[in-house]
């Protein structure tokens, strides 16, 4: 978007741009979300920033009226496959909190100095400032949504000391942590953190079909899902975690509520980021739906399911294992095989709500988990080899990869082909423009939709809806399932793959 497109958005107070850019006003020294109800400032007094960190660096403070940090994030970090986008995905996952700027730079293949220069040029702030903004946003969420002690909030948000936490909150919001908490509804006295309940902001419309997608793949003891809820255990850098998410379409605002049953506070920011990725809560559904509906083949599907989401991944390594097992067979058969494999996982230290196990680690699969699988020996051997490479650190990928880099890492593996890479890219990287042309269910979905809307001269790879073809794939999968066609996670055309 150029300056005047953004200025028209703030003049219209368009809420769908909240979180996608920030408006700084020189005469007031504050920055706002695009939908701020205050009077629209003169264009000559406005500067737009891609990140709140850039506004902080320029000396602006957050608006107390519109609370620009209390919005969904931008979908740009998934759309962008450049260093800036990859870095932001890792920063949001807490890499700087765990490994410092040096660790972030190493993952991206740059020196700390080079990375600082790139991010300052692209985003208006260096990695430390971007991480500080992320911490401040997490802290604000916890302050207004929970009764956690201030010291717990400080460390859960990634601050190294309470003093640093206090100074940052005053600098960013012009309010003390206690003052920020006073702006929210009363939560009662602070209590030890055993369970937290938070509201997850998102852009409407929101299609709850993502819950059904996860529910049919849920593994007993590790996950549980319904058409409007999902819960699971998870292994995070500092320990086990357990959470649930519920959607209530009948309540005002149709809230998405996250309940964290157990987590090490040092992992809280990473958990929040990963849950948002799992439910694709930073997507811009209006932009996606508008592009997809322009294709006659998808128009009726978009009308029937506005705001469709692309499920993310809570654990990149786990997702690869699940993809390798799920290819060439139906979802039900894949779930049965994964349920067998899950017996190799260790019990969680924080059981509850019927969830008592963790998905097996790569080391557990390579050591003995593979013996629980049934099927072609070649497929089992391929899975064991991939798990061994993950366990040994010979294969390392995650949220910070780009699509070419991911393909270069995965394609040399026996049992991995273009479908697997595309599926992992969709769910781990959040890549929005993947089209799985050889997927059996995609082809069945195309046929199902063609019965309602003839394709005409449209291209078979749906290039007309780029860069949102991953969402087209989600609609095609749903159309195939609705028509009762075989729901394979992979095309039979790849059965001859290595």
Image (cartoon, rainbow, N blue to C red):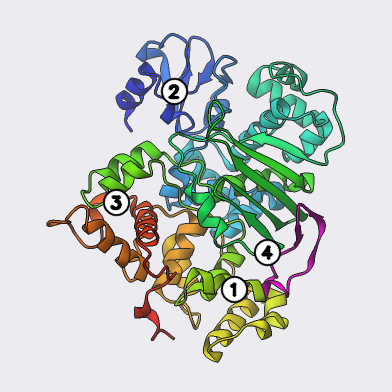
Indicate which disc, 1 or 2, sits on the residue closer to the N terminus.
2
Give the residue at mark 1: 336
Relative to 217, 347 lies left or right: right
Indicate which disc, 1 or 3, sits on the residue closer to the N terminus.
1
| Residues marked 2 and 4 touching at CB (< 8 Å) | no
Residue 173 coordinates in the image, percent (x, y): 64, 20
Give the residue at mark 2: 34
Quadrant (top left/top right/bottom left/bottom right) for the C terminus: bottom left
Which numbered mark, 1 or 3, is in the foreground of this view?
1
User: What secondary structure is found at the residue carrying circle 3?
Assistant: loop
The residue shown at (35%, 26%) is 6
- How far, Cα to Cα, is label 1 from label 3? 35 Å
Residue 399 in sight here:
no
The residue shown at (54%, 16%) is 30
Which numbered mark, 2 or 4, is in the foreground of this view?
4
Query: Does the stretch in magenta take in 382?
Result: no
| Residues marked 4 and 1 touching at CB (< 8 Å) | no
Residue 343 coordinates in the image, percent (x, y): 72, 74
**Res 466 label:** 3
- How far, Cα to Cα, is label 2 from label 4? 43 Å
- Quadrant housing residue 367: bottom right
**Res 220 label:** 4
The residue shown at (54%, 49%) is 227
- How far, Cα to Cα, is label 1 from label 2? 47 Å
- Quadrant housing residue 490: bottom left
Q: Which residues are magenta?
A: 341-361
141 above or below 372? above
- How far, Cα to Cα, is label 3 from label 2? 26 Å
């Amino acid at each position: 978007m150029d300056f005047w497109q953004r200025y028209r958005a703030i003049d219209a107070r368009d809420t769908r741009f909240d979180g996608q850019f920030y408006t700084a006003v020189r005469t007031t020294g504050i920055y706002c979300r695009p939908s701020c109800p205050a009077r629209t400032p003169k264009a000559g007094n406005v500067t737009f920033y891609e990140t709140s960190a850039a506004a902080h660096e320029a000396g602006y403070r957050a608006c107390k009226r519109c609370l620009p940090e209390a919005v969904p994030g931008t979908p740009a970090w998934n759309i962008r496959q450049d260093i800036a986008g990859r870095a932001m995905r890792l920063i949001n996952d807490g890499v700087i909190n765990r490994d410092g700027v040096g660790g972030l730079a190493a993952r991206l293949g740059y020196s700390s100095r080079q990375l600082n220069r790139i991010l300052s040029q692209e985003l208006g702030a260096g990695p430390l400032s971007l991480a500080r903004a992320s911490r401040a946003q997490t802290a604000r969420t916890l302050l207004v949504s929970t009764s956690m002690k201030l010291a717990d909030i400080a460390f859960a948000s990634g601050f190294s000391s309470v003093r640093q936490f206090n100074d940052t909150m005053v600098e960013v919001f012009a309010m003390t942590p206690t003052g920020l908490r006073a702006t929210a509804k009363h939560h009662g006295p602070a209590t030890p953190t055993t369970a937290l309940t938070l509201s997850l902001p998102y852009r409407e419309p929101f299609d709850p079909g993502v819950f059904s997608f996860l529910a049919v793949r849920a593994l007993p003891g590790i996950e549980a899902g319904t058409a409007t809820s999902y819960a699971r255990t998870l292994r995070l850098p500092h320990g086990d975690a357990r959470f649930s998410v519920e959607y209530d379409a009948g309540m005002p605002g149709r809230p998405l509520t996250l309940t964290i049953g157990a987590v090490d506070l040092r992992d809280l920011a990473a958990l929040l980021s990963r849950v948002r990725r799992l439910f694709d809560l930073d997507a811009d559904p209006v932009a996606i739906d508008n592009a997809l509906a322009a294709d006659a083949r998808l128009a009726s599907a978009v009308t029937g399911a506005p705001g469709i989401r692309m499920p993310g991944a809570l654990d990149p390594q786990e997702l690869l294992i699940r993809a390798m097992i799920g290819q060439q067979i139906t979802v039900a058969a894949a779930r049965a095989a994964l349920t067998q494999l899950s017996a190799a996982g260790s019990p969680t230290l924080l059981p509850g709500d019927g969830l008592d196990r963790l998905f097996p680690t790569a080391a557990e699969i390579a050591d003995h988990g593979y013996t629980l699988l049934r099927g072609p020996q070649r497929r089992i051997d391929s899975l064991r080899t991939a798990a061994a490479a993950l366990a040994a650190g010979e294969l390392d990928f995650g949220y910070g990869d780009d699509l070419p880099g991911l393909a270069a890492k995965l394609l040399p593996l026996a049992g991995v082909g273009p479908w697997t890479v595309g599926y992992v890219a969709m769910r781990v990287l959040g890549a929005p423009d993947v089209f799985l042309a050889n997927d059996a269910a995609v082809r069945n979905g195309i046929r199902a939709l063609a019965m309602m809307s003839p394709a005409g001269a449209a291209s078979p790879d749906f290039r007309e809806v780029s860069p949102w073809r991953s969402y087209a794939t989600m609609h095609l999968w749903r159309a195939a399932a609705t028509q009762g066609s075989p729901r394979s996670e992979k095309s039979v055309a790849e059965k001859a793959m290595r």
